[in-house]
Image: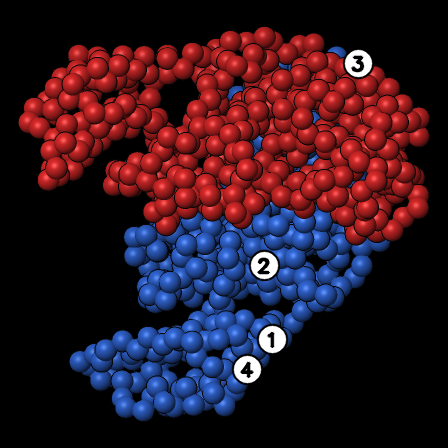
Chain colours: A red, B blue
Amino acid sequence: MKQINLGLCGFGTVGKGVFDVLEKNSNLISLRTGIDFNVKKVLVKNLNKRRNIFSNEIEFTDKIEDIYNDKDIHIVVELIGGVDTAKEIILNSLKNKKSVVTANKAVLATFGYDLAKEAEKNKVDLFFEASVAGGIPIIRVFKETLLSDNIEYFYGILNGTCNYILTEMTDKGLSFNDALKEAQEKGYAESDPTFDIEGIDAAHKLAILMMLAYNIRFDFNNLYVEGISKITDRDIEFANEFGYSIRLLAIAKKKNSSIEGRVHPVLIKKDSILSNIKGVYNAIYVKSEFLGPSLYYGKGAGRYPTANSVVADIVDAGLHLINRAKNMKPVFTIKGSRIKKYKIKDINKLKSKYYLRFSVADMPGVLSKISGILGKNNISIEAVIQKGRVKNMDLPVYIVMITHESLERDIKKAIKIINNLTICKDETFFMRIEDFNG
Amino acid sequence: MKQINLGLCGFGTVGKGVFDVLEKNSNLISLRTGIDFNVKKVLVKNLNKRRNIFSNEIEFTDKIEDIYNDKDIHIVVELIGGVDTAKEIILNSLKNKKSVVTANKAVLATFGYDLAKEAEKNKVDLFFEASVAGGIPIIRVFKETLLSDNIEYFYGILNGTCNYILTEMTDKGLSFNDALKEAQEKGYAESDPTFDIEGIDAAHKLAILMMLAYNIRFDFNNLYVEGISKITDRDIEFANEFGYSIRLLAIAKKKNSSIEGRVHPVLIKKDSILSNIKGVYNAIYVKSEFLGPSLYYGKGAGRYPTANSVVADIVDAGLHLINRAKNMKPVFTIKGSRIKKYKIKDINKLKSKYYLRFSVADMPGVLSKISGILGKNNISIEAVIQKGRVKNMDLPVYIVMITHESLERDIKKAIKIINNLTICKDETFFMRIEDFNG
């Protein structure tokens, strides 16, 4: 039995989960791999905190250099989150020829390119299955299953918090705020939920998947990112009347040399497979040239689903070390030095169908006025809902439309004109529609 | 650039597909792997058949020993199907220290254990992603993602032909025979469809997944296998009335030391995720201890989805050869020599809910008679549908029931008694129900 020593950075939700899986299933893992994975050192913030570990062999430290300078540690497992310290740990570990397993999407989305080059230079592994969609093996799918395939597009439900909120709004008719509050009470949303609900978390994951799929790097700020906080329960109802449900999707598409990357709420057909992904679950729907459509579904967060992905990476890194296999797959499917700098398609050049919600005065001629402006801006209408008049003439009424495929720039231009009309009582709200058949 | 030479056995649907993928995406593959995968020799049945290949470097042969004895071939790709010749090719290739990639479920389900031992003895790879669920990377999921996890159960829609037929029966109200005919016309079913519709194909795939999940071997005939040919359009309707749809599932469950393995039609809740898998698509729903529930969905057959899986295996085998990585993962998650012989749980000991359809004479007292016999055999009833009387008293009427959890032995015993009653006009038909929440 060969031994591989691990330096575990972070002993919170995921860190403790990794420890538990390695301990509970150590027999199964060594039976299947011939390797004894041994947690040698654990990096924690507070050395004085009492921990429920019955082992004298594990050393705790609060100094990061104790991990990456330890010559007996073969694999560093980075689970502290955040960016700067995590990056320092990963980079120094790679420089010291240790393989690294991380769940840190923020670091990878912003510095993945530099880290990949460092890993490849030192011929060690940098694995990150847990960084995207928690327990779902989507990184392996992109690096192994789709290695020889051309990914045309993919749609990801990559943020469980948003999916939970949208599902609750749909199934229970809750307002956004009530659904968010419920998510916070159940531990599915942070007390400051900005990172999740504004789409940033999903965008980090999208960036990683796009690097794998298209072998490009780009300024993270190039990705178009929009959250779900402006969606009202009325939007959910209107979408439903048109035959759609609403999901926060991370979308990437490649057509010839143009690549789209964007995170925003999307109307998708109610009977589509992604529309059936409910609650905190994640799913990625991929359309590639040879494999065709495929879907991967599971828990996108949580102690043990995430820990399971981390341990799978630890096992593969360990097997590579034991086998001295130094020329396996590049970190992001092609070598870092070959990853091309790329400019993601400007969202204003997007062609899409749109959902438009106008808040207007309840008076004659309004629909004609609005549709006239849309027409002049090359936007044609597929369907309209205008709800019956209300008694109080001061209250705005909603006119809701589904457009045919239009240019985003035209949509924004028309909305700007309409928002300036006196009949317009509130900012016009719009969302994009994806009519895919998955 | 390193070169890996392939011996391609079979040049039919999948074989030609593999050739196409390797040729069309050779740049992408070598960019990502640093390897030039070169088809050196192709084994065909008929050397005189004209083939649309513009290469003088590929040698065609109709002798299997030309493949496995060729010292310049590094990886043998077995895609001829069938059992005996395929097994001979695989075994001799492994003996000659060539890695093997195959899509052959029949060979693996029956001789997988011997082949695994031979591969491990010679420290070469035996990969078979394409053997189960075509393009879906379920073998990788079992060997990598779930390596350190405990699989509690899994449900597989593993036969596209059956799923297509059942979907058409459900959505269009077709009879089994009409749906089968349609499947044959569309090329989704063979002219002799026995292998698919009687569940044997799904059982081969189940056997492979069970070896991976539970590290056991067993007599293939131990698996309980029942097809879909006895299901009528009326059963689809009755199931629908009870809130269920019908799918052919491959099921494995482990509880303590007891392992179930079975293929048969199952009633599943209409809103379950597997109930939404339609047409020729395949899906596997897995419940494991740490990852929790997960689902993998895609095309289970077809030239390019299957070829894509084969090429992914070729790439991994090639990388192992280039890296001289001889101690990677065992063929079936643990070494062949450690795979335990196991006796699958007898179907008669199954505890399940059941769907029962009785064809009975249209006369008073029948329901009381039947429910009395069920009660005496420890079977309690959850729901009943008895359709209104017909005019012609000679025609049988249907009584359909959903039972609470019962023992299969009791169900069969009660049915036998009921079938012998004079009021019983036709064989009683039953199916099992799985009320899982996926």
How many neighbours does mark 3 have within 10 angstroms: few (below 14), some (14-19), or many (20 or more)?
Answer: some
Callout 1: SS: helix
Query: Which numbered dot is residue B251?
Result: 2
How many neighbours does mark 4 have within 10 angstroms: few (below 14), some (14-19), or many (20 or more)?
Answer: some
The answer, for residue A273, to whether it is visible in the render is no
Taking the image as shown, residue A303 lies to the left or right of residue A55, namely left
First in sequence, mark 2 or 4: give its number: 2
Residue drawn at the location 16% of the way across and 37% of the way down: A387
Observer-side mark, 1 or 3, equals: 3
Observer-side mark, 4 or 3, equals: 3
Q: CA distance from mark 2 to mark 4?
A: 21 Å
* Residue denoted by label 3: A121
Amino acid at dot 4: Asp
Q: CA distance from mark 1 to mark 3?
A: 60 Å
Residue drawn at the location 35% of the way across and 56% of the way down: B169
Residues at circles 1 and 3 in contact by the CB criterion of under 8 Å: no
Residue drawn at the location 67% of the way across and 46% of the way down: A304
Amino acid at dot 1: Asn
Taking the image as shown, residue B178 lies to the left or right of residue A3, namely left
Residues at circles 4 and 3 in contact by the CB criterion of under 8 Å: no
Q: CA distance from mark 4 to mark 3?
A: 66 Å
B379 is higher (above) or lower (below) than B347:
below
Q: CA distance from mark 2 to mark 3?
A: 46 Å
Callout 2: SS: strand
Amino acid at dot 2: Ile
Q: Position of residue A190 (x, y in %)?
A: 56, 37
Observer-side mark, 2 or 3, equals: 3
Query: Which numbered dot is residue B348?
Result: 1
* Residue denoted by label 4: B410
How many neighbours does mark 2 have within 10 angstroms: few (below 14), some (14-19), or many (20 or more)?
Answer: many
